[in-house]
Every structure is written in structure tokens, then in C-alpha cells.
Amino acid sequence: MIQVDGLNKIYRVAEKQPGFAGTLRHFVRRRTRDVMAVQDVSFSIEPGEMVGFLGANGAGKTTTLKMLCGLIHPSGGRVEVAGFSPQRRQADFLRRITLVMGQKQQLLWDLPPMDSLRVNAAVYGIPEAVAQRRIRDLADLLELGEELSRPVRKLSLGQRMKAELLAALLHEPEVLFLDEPTLGLDVNAQARVRQFLAEYNRRTGATVLLTSHYMADITALCPRVLLIHQGRLFHDGPLEGLAEQLAPEREVRLELESPGEPEALAGFGRIERMEGCEVRLLVPRDQLTEVVAQLLERFPVRDLDVTDPPIEELIGGLFRQGRV
Amino acid sequence: MGRYWRTLRRFWSTALAVQLEYQANVLIELLAVAMSLSGSLFLLSLFYGPDQTLGGWSWAQALMVQGLYTVFDGMASTWLRPNLGAIVTHVREGTLDFVLLKPIDSQFWLSLRTLSPAGLPEIGLGLGLLAWGSLQAGVVLTIPSLCIVLVMLLAGGLILYSLWFLIAATSIWFVKTWNATEVLRALLASGRYPLNAYPPALRVLFTFVLPVAFLTTIPAKVLLDSAGTPMLLAGLGLAVVFFAAARSFWLFALRFYTSASS
């Protein structure tokens, strides 16, 4: 479904020194530098696969995604999606794909999502009755009801994201490009979006390429992961192993009644940060339950929270350790 | 074609719905139009005493020009500003991506996505002023002359649109179009007085470089029978040229956008 061979993208960026003198110099003699945003990336994705796309900020994820949907022309290499060359952006190609961006929205801010959905139905040439049926079906799956007739500006972030997904899927695309679809959502909303994506993939057999900051998104949805770092593809394979390799530790955040003693806490894990009553500990996955139980027993704990460290940190750590 | 037509209807019905979300806005805009029109009529009246002319234009004839200007100003508020002004925002916020990924012409989407009905009364006022001025100036309104007015208005609208779109399209490079559209609006405002009221150098500029003359003065002249068919054809030809320029510039700008955006 998606075929990528030796994909490259070079950006030319202007270099400017800070300050007024730098601005003047920049104006008179512009110096530019080529930045390799994506270098020699190759992979192929079969129809119906759900693939996670991992990488730190600026690793080249979004650039690659945009080349796959035809928003950016590659500087080199070959891309084929659903049998089309994306950069030509033919109507038949655009009808087969969709792009969801967690930090941007296409819904009209002042109107209920239903109005935007009708516009999309007209743009994609979906007959009224068919559009109504699809909206009903998708709304059921997404657990959206009267929210569809409330102005977007009055919806919560989670409701808005679900409505965005509905708008992006109305034309029943075969390929879904999802760029941080759960960004900023609370845990419950994230889980619901994940459930929906899994169910949608199961029902329609759509191919999904997903980037996310949340490890949980990737572990829940994607059996296969592409890991990109500084524009290069470093890992292409099953998630198993990579998850533990990426996140062998979990982060325990503690809030104590009184400032903690570093020595007393050191035995429970690696101390990430310690500020007064707040402590961040990194604890190996297999010792987590035991450690948490002991912490609660030994210390006056006011609050305790266990999370996966953000992907950025995990990947950063991985590269520092030279494990990839 | 049917799809574009259906899309356009959806575009405009949602635009109307957005406007009605803010009822007070509609009233305020109406009020602003009435104030601005009476202001410019007052200003114009200052140039005229009894039996006086301005650059050879009588009061009634000058009213025709003012009427045409008001029509185009209304067009700008109803159609051009809401749509083409949003291009900058699309580029800055990256939502242009959504437009480019729709299986529909992007220039069509960006040019016709919305309508601001608050400008419609201004168009009506302008047409009324044009009719009144024409009657006072002794123009005999016939079916052919009405057709000519319509064609000139369409040609003028297309010229104005193309100029505006050209400027808006540069936002792909400059992101902030440093209120260039405001400059354009100021230029359009120069069309509210007959061309002969300006010094010769400006007359040349307004006729050939930024053809404001083709929006107001020349249509009025055509109606007054002092400029014939050649001018009408020139206006039409200019409209086609400007539209073609806007179209090809957009396609060029998009090539640039798609190879540079991140």
C-alpha cells in the first residue's frame, strides 16, 4: 500500500547571527545551509497494517508523513501510496487518503461539527444519504451524539479530536496518516481514541501510519514500529522488545509530606530529580509493584503517580547509550 | 461541475450560519457602511458648488463614479476580504494543508469559501447611487446599457479579485503580507473620484499599472457614452489577463510551498 525507496528531503535554511549586526549581515550576504531532514529512508507497508512512527521532535517524522500525503515534494527517492505518486495530488489519490494532525484542526470553530461534515461531504462528492449514514455509524463508534450539533468552540479537547477524526474519515479513506492524534488529551480520551482507531482498522482494513508522543498509543495499536532519528530510519520491526528496550524503566513521581532524604530513596531506583517534597524516580519495570508498595510503607507519601517517561526522553536515552 | 456547485452552496450556507452566530456584528457592519457612505458623499459635495464641475465631471456624474466605487467596496467586504484575508492565516497556522489535501481546486476553495453578507447592503447602496446618478446625468437606461454595466462590473470585480489574490498568494513566502491588502484597499479608494481629478502621472498609474480606472471611471464613461466599445473590450481583456496571471502565480506559489513547507 505504501512503498518508500531511498527517500530524501533537504531543506535550505538561512543562517542568521543574533542581534542587529547579525540581521544586517544576513540582509547583505545571506548564508544558507542545507539540512537533511530525511535521509535515505526506505520501507514498505502492506494494506491493513498499523504502523507506529517514532522519533524525537525534529527527527523527520512529520516531514516524511507530509511527503507521503503529497504536501511536500521529496528531494530524492521514490514514494508510492495506493498506487499513486503523492506529490501530484491527483483527486483520485486524495480521495483515498486522509491526514489528521493533533495540533491543527479543520473543523469550523464557530459552527457545530455537523456543518463542517456537510462541507466535506460536498467536497468529496458523497451523496447526502450516504454521508448521513456514515456520520451516524462513525458517531456511534466514536461515542459522539449531540456534540455534533454544538459549536466546536464549546467542545472539550477530547470531543473536538473525535469530531476531527469523523471529519477526516467521512470519505472512507484507505490510508490514514495520523500525526499525534492524541496530543494533549487526558488518559481516558486517549484510550477512547485508541479503541476507535483499532476498531476502525479492524472493520475497514484501512492502512494506518501513526506518530505519537505517547508510548501507550504505540503499544496499544502498532505491532510494527518505524524508529527515525535525525532523518534516518533506525529500526523497522515488531514492537516487542523495543518497548522494553526503549522503556526498561518506569517513572514514579512522589509527593512526600516532608522533604525526602536522597540516601533513603536511592535504594529504590534511580533518582531523576528531587526538589523539596517532590521526587522523580526511575524504577525497573519488573520491580515496580514491589518498589511502590515499599515506598508507601516507608515514607509519608501524599501523592504517587506512575508513568512511562515521554518517548523523547526514552529515545534520547537510547541514542546516548549507543544502543541503536 | 455539479460537485463544485454543491460545494459552493454548502460553503455559503455555513458562512451565513457563522455570521448569524454573531447577530450584533451584522447590525454594526450595516451601521458602519451607512456612516462611511454618507461621509464620502459629504466629502465629495465639498468639491462642488452650484453649477461646478470637477475635472469636467458634473455632480451627478461624480455620483455615478462614487456609486461604482461603493459597489466594489461592497464586493471587497462581502467576498474578497473574508476569503483572501484568510489565506495568510492558513499559511501561518498550517491549515492550508487541509485545503491542499481536498480533492477540489485549492484556488476555488480559498476564493469562495465564505461570504460576509454584511457587505451586501453596501452593494445595493452602490447600485442605487449609480442608478440615481445616471438618471440625474441624463443617461437613458436601456437593456443594452444595463448589460454593459453588468459586464463592466463583472470585469472590474475580476480585476480586483485577481490583484488581491496575487498579493495574498505572496503570503506563502512572506507569511505576513504586511497589510499589503490594506494598500490595495487604499488604492481602490482612489477610484471613488473621477480619474480626471488626479494629476496626469497618477492617471497613467491608475489606468495601466493598477487599473483602478477600469473599475469606476471607465464604466461610468461608457455609460455616459463618452467612451465606446473599445474601452469595454479593453476592460474585459484586462480582466482575463489579470485572472490568468493570478491563476498561474498561484500554481507557481504552490510549487514553492510544497517543496519548502515543514
Image (tube, grey):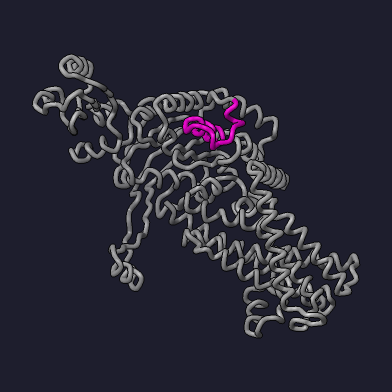
**Going 46% across and 40% down the picture, which residue do you hit?**
A101
Query: Residue A285: x percent and y percent?
Result: 23, 22
Examine the rendered structure and indicate whether residue B46 appears above or below residue B151: below
Examine the rendered structure and indicate whether residue A25 appears above or below residue A73: below
Examine the rendered structure and indicate whether residue B104 appears above or below residue A222: below
Looking at the image, can residue B154 be seen? yes
Query: Residue A322: x percent and y percent?
Result: 19, 39
Which quadrant of the figure has residue A323? top left
Foreground pick, A212 / B152: B152
> Is B155 on the left-hand or right-hand side of A165?
right
Foreground pick, A300 / A180: A300
Span of residues in magenta: A146-168
Which quadrant of the figure has residue B65? bottom right
Outermost residue, left side: A263
Question: Total number of numbered labels?
Answer: 0
> Magenta segment: does it hold B70?
no
